[in-house]
Structure formats: structure tokens, C-alpha cells
Amino acid sequence: MERFFKKISVPPPSPIIEKNNDTRGHDSAEFILSNLPSDPGKRIRILDYNPNIRDQVRRAYVLAGPQQPKTHNFPYKKYGDTQRRFNPAWFDDFPTWLEYSVEKDAAFCLCCYLFKPNIGEQAGGDFFVGEGFSNWKKKERLLTHIGGVNSAHNQAWSNFEALRSQKQHIQSFFSKTHDEARIQYRARLNASIDCCRFLLRQGLAFRGNDESEHSSNHGNFLELLQFIADHNEDVKAVTLKNAPENHKLTSPDIQKDIVNACATETIKAIIEDVGTSLFSILIDESRDVSTKEQMAIVLRYVDKNGHVVERFIGIEHVTSTAALSLKETIDGVFSRHKLSMSRLRGQGYDGASNMQGEFNGLKALIMKESGCAYYIHCFAHQLQLALVAVAKKNIQIESLFSIVTILVNVVGASSKRCDLLREKQSIAVIEALNSGEFTSGKGKNQETTLKRAGETRWGSHLGTLVSIMTMFSSILDVLEVIADDGVSSQQRCEANNLLDSMQSFDFVFNLHLMKDILGITNELSQALQRKDQDIVNAMKLVGVCKQRLEIMRKNGWDSLLNEVSEFCLKHDIDVPNMDDMFLSRRRGQRKAKAVTNMHHYCVGIFYVVLDWQLQELNNRFNETNTELLLCLACLCPADSFSAFDSQKLLRLAQFYPKDFSMNELVILKIQLETYIVDMRSSIEFSGLKEIGDLAKKMVQCKKHKVYSLVYLLVTLALTLPVATATVERAFSAMKILKNRLRNRMGDQWMNDNMVIFIEREIFDGIGNDVVMQRFQNMKTRRGIL
């Protein structure tokens, strides 16, 4: 059997068979045999004349598959027919292998003929496979042909039966082997996906510097796979060195395909969750460690449970930051993810002129396609921009931050200086603890260093100023060391200038003033970074911030002056008498009107900085006074819906003509009257404070179906972005994933890693089977699932 199993290909149909019937397209042994002449002599002659047909019959049995070919006995007449001398009664059990020819009056054995190369002398020569056996006087020759257990005939018959048996069929053998290969392939692929899943969630690198066989560290992916194999015998049996035909599924291309499949399924889940909901788009630009300009894209929408959701869908590398280029990139993203621009209801950017431009900016280009995609500047971004503007307008504050920048650069110029600063600060903390000035406790008096301020990093300026105040004495000690033992005269000069500047009353006063102002606005900044922030609450927070600054302007001077004076006395800094005349070192000020120190610091700096800060906040947050935002405030459920105004809500609906037709506006007016009565009389809605809480409660109580048009207004209010915190978090994630050691990451590879790292919650709900199927369908694979 092994000899002809290797002959799988079937030769072209023989012309002799085609004379009897058209056999093209058929390869079963049963069909070929049924089309041969009924007389065994002619059949044998045809098979003997055409050896290819004989091989074809044998191979056809091999390829027959699950069908069971029948035994083809040649026809013979009943016993008693005078035309033959053969008597089947000679056998108690008539052999199924025997076939009789009436014309030749001879018996034949087809199974022996099909396996003729295995027949020896003991099978009776060629009598039963050639001319036929007709010597009926020696009927014992039939038994001789059968022979013993291991005779050639029995071997041929066993081969013939094996062909008829489905379990012994070669296709069954291949099928069994194929099933085992599939199981091994799935186990191997599943192990690789598990490794990728762990590395993606942790934001770790996949490859190592040296992945050769003799390397001591093959990289995170291979090392993790080896760890899993060492602790799981089933995985070990099919992975790495035990993988068949070197099909390990560990190459970099396979890793990238698996990660791409994971990212594709994650984004698919996000797009399916968005569904037909209205959404807003949040975009911000940043430069990665390889100096590539990247654009992060986030979708903001209300899900089916009434929750405000912001989902990161990708980061795009843009070669140009022009508005048209950014618009083309957004169109490509929408097309790739099958998002409709007609469902876009809001835009949120970082405030750059190329984005928020009224005429040619990205905002205007998008509103040409979707007129209801209203632009709401990120409130937290506006706050940060306001603080930066103040630093640029006031020369005293600008001077303060200039000194701070130089100070951070000088003290943090080398590891030696940083270590010296930590050492000095540790000594100062120990002395303060011993004197009772500081108290010990969990999380207190931690080792720290100077923080570097950044204009685009929220809260960074406050952190820098607080760290300087905390380590003021230690910083002075380090500067004195540099001034005395500096390597170059330039370093000693810089240290001396910083010592003079820092030990002046002006520096300390400006330091405390900006610390208090930034402390007030920092609370607002942190609150505005919440992902579920709604417009009404953001407007209130801005108002609170303005109110606190006004209170500080009216009543904060005395407390600030006392705090500055105590700080100066502690660090041996001269405090000028506020009633004395202010002495300016500027030449132009000599001719100016003489003023006291009180007037200079209180009116010239304190009031001016606070007034400019308030003015800047009013300018930046003027959108809170627009009609759209005032109408949105009427949806707030606080104080039993005290802000409810049906006329303003009808006006709000008119801002969205695509969502509210003229007939629906009439229905909405009636629905609002019923809605407010129901809400104020329901206990479930009595304690709500924010619009987001209202949406969740309406879905829980099924009110979103009863008041469908009102709920649509609520979702539109929640869809408008007031914070781009998710976009900022995307850039924070990018710094983790694409660091100095991974600065050659490709755009697609980085995008796939970021999608899964940021949206790991969505990715956790995607099973390995789904990823396997996506991976398998990406291209032709060696393995079969």
C-alpha cells in the first residue's frame, strides 16, 4: 500500500474509457470500473492494454474519499446453465473475490490483478490475473490461489479491503494529520497572542537587542514566550524549538501582524459602540521623541447607557500642520473607519490659529461640511494660555520665570549638582524635623528635586515655584558651592547672579504672588481635566476661579505681605519698609513720580497682575457668554431644574436643524412641558447636579424613550467637548511607548501600540479567537485554524 500511496495525481482519462462513456471530471474507481465492459476478459485486456487505466483505478480508490466503493464481481449465470462448467456449489462460502467469464469460461481475480506486482508464484502464476483459470478438474487450484494467511492473494485482498475502508483511506490519514496540525497551530498562535497582550497592556518593547540563539536576553516577547512554555507543557510541546517546520510564529512580521489585528479589533469595537450616535472630535498636535509631528484623534460621544465616553482611535503622522493638510488627514481617518461627517456635532482643538481660524482654519473647513459641528475651545487649554499670556504681559512676572528657568538649568545641569541638592535638602529636612518645624508621616518630606516648567504642561509652573520655595535654602547652598568651586568663570558668574536675584525682596514677592494665583487656577485646571466634564459645570468652575481672584484682589494683600515678610526673615533677606520711597534702578524711573514701596508692590504689581489675569480669563472664556452655552445651561438638573427654560431649549434645538425638523420642534415644545413636570415630581431625579447624571438617570428609568427629543438635546450638550484631557493623555502615553530607546518605531507600529495601551479596557473584552480570525484573514498563512 505504501508503494502507491505516493502516487496521488490522477492521469488524464483514457480514450478507451471515453468510448464507453464520458469520464472527464470523474476520478472515482467505482465510475471507472462501471464503464468498463461487463465481460471480464475484455476488461482485463483493456486494463492490460492500458496500464495507466489500471493505475488510475488504483489511485482513484485512494482519492475516493469518504465514499465506500462496492466490490465489482463479474456477472455469471445461475448454476445449471449448459454453457459453463463452473459450479459455485463447490464452495460452502462463495468467495467474493472470484469473477467468472461466460465467453472464456474462466475465472478471474481482479484484486490480485490490481495489485499484480505483489503476486508471486504461489498465487498460481498469471492464471487468475491474465488468461483466466478454466481447469475445473483441478478446482483445488482455487484454494491454492487463496493460499495461507500471508499469501500473496490475501495480501492483495487486504490491500483491496483497505482501499474500501474509510479509516484506512489516505484522505482519512491526511485529515487526522491535518487536525493535529490545526490544534498545534492554534495553541502556538494563542501563546503568541497572550505574550503580545501582556506587552501591549504594559507598554513594553517587544524585541531585544540580540535575539540570536546564544543570546542571554532575547527580548521581552521571546523571553515571555519561553517563560510560558517552561510553565505549561502543552505550550512547550508546540512552540519555539518544538514548532514543526520552524513555524514558530515569533518573527517581527508576525508580531506586528498580531498587534495590528489586536488594534483593528479594538478600534472596530469602539466604532461599533459609537454606532449611529452623534459625536465630537478632539484633536491635538505634538512632536514625538523622533521629532515627528503627530496628531492625536479622540471621539467623544454618549453611549447607550447615557455615559459620556471619550475614545482614542489613533495617532496620525502629519508632514504639514496647515489646515488643508490636517483636514485631509481627518477625512482619511473618517473614511478608514467609516465615520460620517454628517454625525459630527462638535470640535475641540488646542487653540492654535491653524485650527481655530474663523475663515481658513480647520474649524471653518469642517463646518463647511457639517454646519452643526460647533467649535468649543478646551477650557483647560484656555486657562493655561491665559497664565502664559500674563507671564508675557507683565515684565515683573516674566522676569521671575526667566530667573526660574536659568535656575533650573544651572542647578540641574549635571548629576553631581542634583545629588548635591538632594544631600543639602535631606540635611535641611532632618534639622526641621528635629526642631519641630516639619512633622513626619506617610508621604511627607519625600526626596524631590527642581521641576522644570513647561508652557503646555498644565500645573507645571505651580510645581516649579512650590519646589523652589520648599528647597530655597538648599538651592542657595548649591549656588554658593558653584560660585566658589565652579569649573569656569561663566558658571561662577551665573551662580553669583542667581544668588543676588533670589535673595532679593522682589524675587520672593513675585514668587509668592504667582504661587497664590497659580494655586487658585490650578484647582480649576485639575477639575477641567476630568473626562466626564460637562459644559455647565465647567462654566461654574470658571466663575468660581474668577470670584476667588477678585476676593484675593480685595482682601489678599495683607496676608500675602505677611507671608512674604516671614519667608524673608527666615532666609535672612532684607524686607523694605513699605512707607519708604521706592528706589528704582532703571534710569527712566528717576524722572518718574516718586512712589512708596507699598504703592509699587501693591498697586504696581499686585493689582496689575490680578487685573490682567482677570481680563485674560474674561477674554479667553468669552464663549461661555454665547447663546449656545447659555441655552445648554438650561438643561442642568441642579436645585430641582431651577435653570429650566423651555424657550431657550427650543432655541438650542434650532441650532441643530439636521436633528430637529419643523414638526419635531412643535412636538418638542409639548414634550418639554410634560418633561419638566415629570422631572420635578420624581424622587429619582431630585438629587441630580450635572447634565451627565441626568443622562444616566434617564436611561436607567427608561425616560430617554418617553422623552426622546429632550434626551437628544441632553446628548448634544454632553457631546460638545469642554476638555481635551484624553488627547493630552495620548501624548503622555506616546512618551511611554516611544522613548529614547524606541525612537525608530514606525507610524503604524506606534499607532497600534498606542490604541491598545490607551484603550486597554476595550481590548480586555476582545477574546483571542477574534484576534486569531483577524490575523488569519490578513494574508495567506502557512497554518490553518
Image (tube, rainbow, N blue to C red):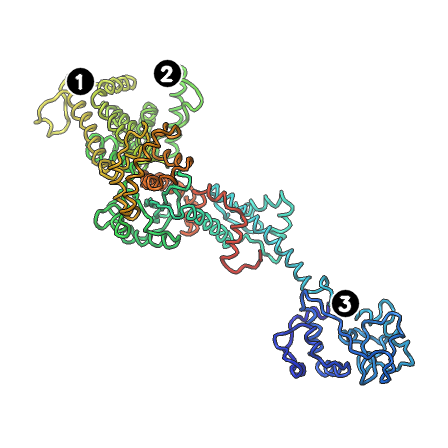
Q: Give the spatial CA distance, label 3 vs label 1.
A: 117 Å
627 or 566: which is nearer to us? 627
Where residue 171 sits: x, y (%)?
A: 67, 64
Taking the spot 55% from the left edge, 48% from the top edge, the residue there is 222
559 or 413: which is nearer to us? 559
Residue 385 visible somewhere in the drawing: no
User: Of the residues shown, which amino acid type is indicated by label 2?
Assistant: Glu
Where residue 551 sits: x, y (%)?
A: 23, 23
Q: Quadrant of the N terminus?
A: bottom right
Secondary structure of the residue carrying numbered label 3: helix
Q: Is residue 635 left or right of residue 91?
A: left
Q: Are there few (<14), some (14-19), or many (20+) residues within 10 Å of tag 3?
A: some
Above or below residue 159? Residue 540 is above
501 or 380: which is nearer to us? 380
User: Of the residues shown, which amino acid type is indicated by label 3?
Assistant: Glu
Q: Give the spatial CA distance, label 2 vs label 3.
A: 100 Å
Q: Which mark is residue 578?
A: 1
Q: Quadrant of the C terminus?
A: bottom right
Q: Quadrant of residue 638?
A: top left
Q: Which residue is mark 2?
A: 437
Q: Nearer the viewer, mark 3 or mark 1?
A: 3
Above or below residue 67? Residue 137 is below
Say which label, 2 or 3, has the lower sequence index: 3
Q: Give the spatial CA distance, label 2 vs label 1.
A: 29 Å
Taking the spot 41% from the left edge, 15% from the top edge, the residue there is 434
Above or below residue 278? Residue 507 is above
Secondary structure of the residue carrying numbered label 1: loop
